[in-house]
Amino acid sequence: MHKTLLFLFFVSSTTLFWAQDHSDTQKHLLKGIIQDAKTKKPLVGTNIINLNRVTGVTSTESGRFKINVYLNDTIYFSFLGYQSIKLKITNDLLKGNTLEIAMYEYPTDLDEVVLKPYQLIGVLEVDAKNVPIDKFARIHINGLPQTFEVGAPIAKKYTSPVDAIFHPVDFVYELFGKKPKQLRKLKKLRSEDQLRDMLENKANREVLMEYLEMDKTQLNALLDYCNYSEYFINNASDLQVIEAVLECYENYKALKKGSTQRERIKE
């Protein structure tokens, strides 16, 4: 009798565990409409990114969207001039109902800009003439792995106890080493065409900060340490910043592996 009860308990427990595990890996289609919270007008072209799967879509002319999600994924909604939203996917949201997402305008100054002041075509001789040399420390040509120096980079040094506690490039090096998925996600953001289009026209850094687990001050400190100019830090698109961070990480990783002394890294 005891053996029978034990067997039934084991089977029921195993079935329950399988059902829970299966639900976590089941793909769902999340459908919804995005509107202005006050006017109820649809927000056309809202960027919707699944931060866990690194996939994205934009809302249609009627403000509607469809995106594949899994339980516990986080979905990021952003629209120029509006406060961004992060939505955690729960069982309640997966019941098949059409979601209504209400977005609020920023009350005052925008924390997001659209900036495409020049076009780079990939030819150094041409591109160098089209970029204000006095404003940039370096130029990155999309599609080419190297960064072309325009001004001599300034070496960064520890200037306070806070710098010694939180050294941004060390933080990123450790983050990508301990969480390689974060690095792969960042690289996917750069490589997916639809995501590239979204990020090329944005400059609020929210998606990047989510993956780097940094706030804006820390991200700016990282770019500063990597010798990017103040103009670049303030005006580069999200896509340009992602490329800058990845390049800085690769350069630092190569230097770190080639030296066992931190003093050489700080030089």
Image (spheres, rainbow, N blue to C red):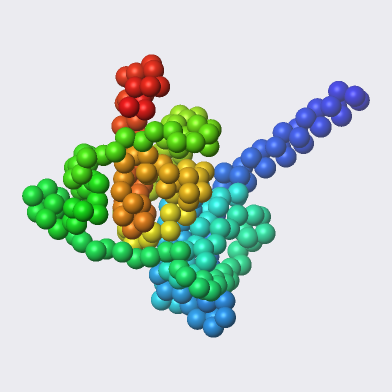
The answer to whether 101 appears left or right of 266 in the picture is right
Q: Nearer the viewer, residue 101 or 237?
A: 237
Q: Nearer the viewer, residue 233 or 258?
A: 233
Residue extending farthest bottom: 39
Which residue is drawn at the image coordinates 86% and 23% (left, top)? 3
Q: Is residue 196 visible?
A: no
Residue 162 position, x and y percent, is: 53, 37
Residue 50 position, x and y percent, is: 49, 53
The part of the image, by quadrant, that contains residue 9 is top right
Residue 67 position, x and y percent, is: 48, 59
Which residue is drawn at the image coordinates 72% and 40% (left, top)? 16
Which residue is drawn at the image coordinates 43% and 69% (left, top)? 80
Classify the position of the C terminus by image quarter. Answer: top left
Q: Nearer the viewer, residue 267 or 86?
A: 267
Residue extending farthest front: 159
Give the total of numbered labels: 0
The part of the image, by quadrant, that contains residue 237 is bottom left
Residue extending farthest top: 260
The part of the image, by quadrant, that contains residue 81 is bottom left
Q: Is residue 20 above or below residue 60?
A: above
Which residue is drawn at the image coordinates 51% and 58% (left, top)? 76
Residue extending farthest left: 125
Q: Is residue 134 visible?
A: yes
Classify the position of the N terminus by image quarter. Answer: top right
The answer to whether 5 appears left or right of 117 in the picture is right
Q: Is residue 199 above or below residue 10?
A: below
Residue 129 position, x and y percent, is: 11, 55
